[in-house]
Amino acid sequence: MVEKRRIAVITSGGDASGMNATIRAVTRYAIYKELEVYGFYEGYKGLIGNSFKVLDLSLVGGIIDRGGTFLYSARSERFRCSDGQKEAIESLKKNKIEGLIVIGGDGSFKGAHDLHKRGIQVVGIPATIDNDIPGTDYSIGFDSALNVIIDLISKIRDTAYSHDRIFVIEVMGRNSGLIAINTGLACGADFILVPERKVDLISIANDIKENRKDKRHTLIVVAEGAARASEVASSIKLLVGREVRISVLGHIQRGGSPSALDRILAAEFGRKAVDLLLANESDCMVGIKAMKIITRKFEDIFEMNKEIDQELFDLAHILST
Ligand code: F6P
């Protein structure tokens, strides 16, 4: 019997809704292309420890709509050092694996790039709710997180207008304001605070006092990397002299069933990543630009910064006044 060629897949970094749908797409498309698929547990940690499961059609059944990742995820300190990387490569070689698909964020892609430099064929699939990976308009998990957050903010708005309150809502985004801008725009937030722009609480307080006296609800959406909700709330309370409540959404934003967009991206990214391995491509990520599936070299995206869309940011403010 002719031995089938083998590839491996891992999920790495913070989990994102749609990772399971992506593992399913990679596995089923690779099997369709007559490959064998090894799913390693807990990202690079599982590669180092040679902890895996051979995936088949039924094992990836019933996971398309599940949040999290059934291959589990981790951030491996050991993989950052040369010994860890050598152990990961040993596992791949021992199992005769020819190519690796890494589903994760840009930190995970740096690890993939290191493996490429050591002779391993690697392709990345962007997955992070922060959507902060340059070179792609969307990462798996971003759209699902936006939908979760929008639903939660709408509920907070019910209380805000019933009680004539100012609410500060803290969303995720350690280094990026993309979640805050997109959810703020979609929820009609009055103010959006992001790490990429200076936070000016005095001007926000003046705006609330002068222009929003008659508004029964004022919503301030703050990215965690811009300021903490509690700090924003105490300053605004002091400056405006009104009741302020806070809501820190936390990890609730990362869980839940993936949105339609994330499931469709999972299918398209999964197929493209397998096709790239079959074409002997390496050291690159798949992505989507202007609704077209594209490929980008890791080194190019490491050089780039993902900027916030200033026009969208301004529009959110214009529409809320
Ligand atoms: O997935 C990215 C992210 O959501 C960041 O916005 C956030 O700061 C971080 O994960 C927190 O994740 P953890 O608690 O897993 O370190």
Image (spheres, rainbow, N blue to C red):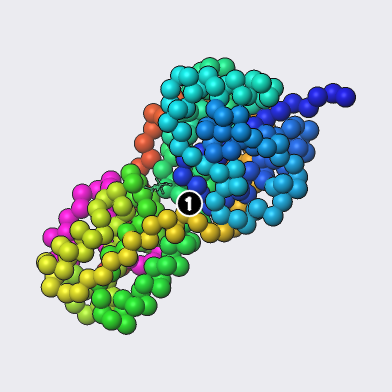
- For label 1, the residue is 142
Residue range of the region highlighted in magenta in the rendering = 186-207
- The residue shown at (71%, 28%) is 6
The location of residue 314, given as percent across then percent down, is 30, 56
Q: In the figure, residue 211 lies in which quadrant?
A: bottom left
Q: Is residue 205 magenta?
A: yes
Q: Is residue 226 above or below residue 88?
A: below
Residue 137 within the magenta-colored segment of the rendering: no
Instruction: Tell me the quarter of the picture where residue 100 sits.
Output: top right
Left or right of residue 164, residue 106 in this image:
right
User: Dot 1: few (<14), some (14–19), or many (≥20) neighbours within 10 Å?
Assistant: many
Three-letter code, disc 1: Phe
Q: Is residue 242 visible?
A: yes
Residue at the (75%, 45%) spot, across then down: 57
Q: Is residue 253 left or right of residue 33?
A: left
* Quadrant assignment, res 8: top right
Q: Is residue 217 above or below residue 291?
A: below
Q: Position of residue 287 (x, y in %)?
A: 54, 39
